[in-house]
């Protein structure tokens, strides 16, 4: 139960935390803006922001001295959640589509076009298909990675 | 608040749901196996499985008649969550590393090597970097996609 998926969920595995990080990637930084956009209670927002700061996903940065005010910015660790968010966005837009089309498009500045994420292999560069992948135990495996023997070994 | 990220979270945006889907991608299908692996209460597991079936992420398939028994298999919609899970796994292994190394490696059968996901653009094929991406409003935008004017427009 300590695989990378579970450890990611320990950090951001809560609905509001994901949406706070999503808004942070859109440039939102201030408490009142998060609060207004998410329609979240101030109490819960305070807790979630504090947890994301403790987990080094956001950093709390002063932007005004008198009265003292802080804003929340993504750390390098937080910024790298963009791919999780992009994969979620693509999946939601495909499988839970809105009648008139998506709320937003991701644009690749380099080519100027709408884009979705095409996953490729870090070793050979080929496009990754789910059926080409398998999970093998690593050094910290606790015995939970191997397939269940009673099944036929095929996933899903 | 109805972007693809939020809609994905409506379907699987709960810790246990993600872990159930993760285990399903490893080939787990039966109630008792999910229960044992996840250490989740039977009550909560029943609720979560039911919700994932309602959302067409899992399907409930009979595998035995007498007594009647069912197992849970990923639907095509559920299977396509693999990329969200892979992105989570890569992030967790990088930013919340275990002292001895990861619990599991993803292997690309085609080349036989350990792999991580390298995201590329569906239009031009170039590797996607976070800084090359921007979000633009789509047909269903409710005004929440555009950057907050008071900021400098840079994300994070």
Image (spheres, coloured by chain):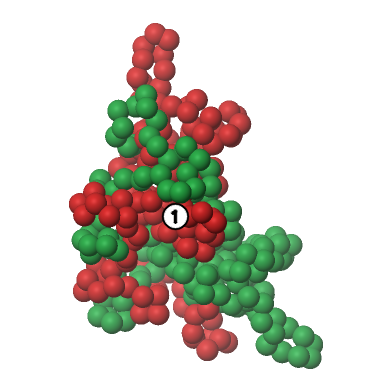
Chain colours: A red, B green
| Residue furthest top in the image | A66
Q: Is residue B127 left or right of residue B26?
A: left
B62 above or below B8?
Answer: below
Residue topped by disc 1? A89
Classify residue A125 by image quadrant.
bottom left
Q: Secondary structure at mark 1?
A: helix
Residue in the foreground of this view, choosing between A117 and A145: A117
Residue in the foreground of this view, choosing between A115 and A75: A115
Where is residue B88 drawn, in percent x and y? 41, 58
A152 above or below B39?
Answer: below
The structure residue drawn at horizontal position 53% and vertical position 78%, both measured from the top left corner, is A156
Where is residue B92 drawn, in percent x and y? 39, 55
Where is residue B103 drawn, in percent x and y? 40, 66
Q: Which quadrant, please, contains the C terminus of chain B? A: top left
B76 above or below B18?
Answer: below
Residue in the foreground of this view, choosing between B126 and A48: B126
Q: Is residue A28 left or right of residue B42?
A: left
Q: Is residue B67 visible?
A: yes
Classify residue A75 by image quadrant.
top left
The structure residue drawn at horizontal position 39% and vertical position 54%, both measured from the top left corner, is A86
């Amino acid at each position: 139960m300590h695989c990378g998926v579970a450890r990611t969920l320990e950090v951001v595995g809560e609905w509001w935390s994901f949406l706070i990080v999503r808004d942070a990637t859109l440039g939102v930084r201030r408490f009142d803006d998060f609060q207004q956009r998410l329609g979240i209670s101030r109490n819960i927002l305070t807790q979630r922001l504090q947890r994301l700061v403790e987990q080094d996903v956001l950093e709390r940065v002063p932007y005004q001295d008198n009265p003292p005010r802080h804003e929340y910015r993504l750390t390098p660790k937080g910024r790298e959640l963009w791919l999780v968010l992009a994969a979620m966005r693509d999946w939601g837009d495909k499988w839970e589509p809105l009648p008139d089309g998506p709320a937003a498009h991701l644009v690749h500045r380099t080519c100027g076009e709408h884009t979705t994420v095409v996953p490729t292999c870090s070793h050979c560069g080929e496009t990754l298909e789910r059926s080409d992948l398998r999970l093998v135990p690593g050094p910290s495996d606790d015995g939970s990675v191997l397939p269940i023997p009673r099944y036929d070994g095929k996933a899903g």
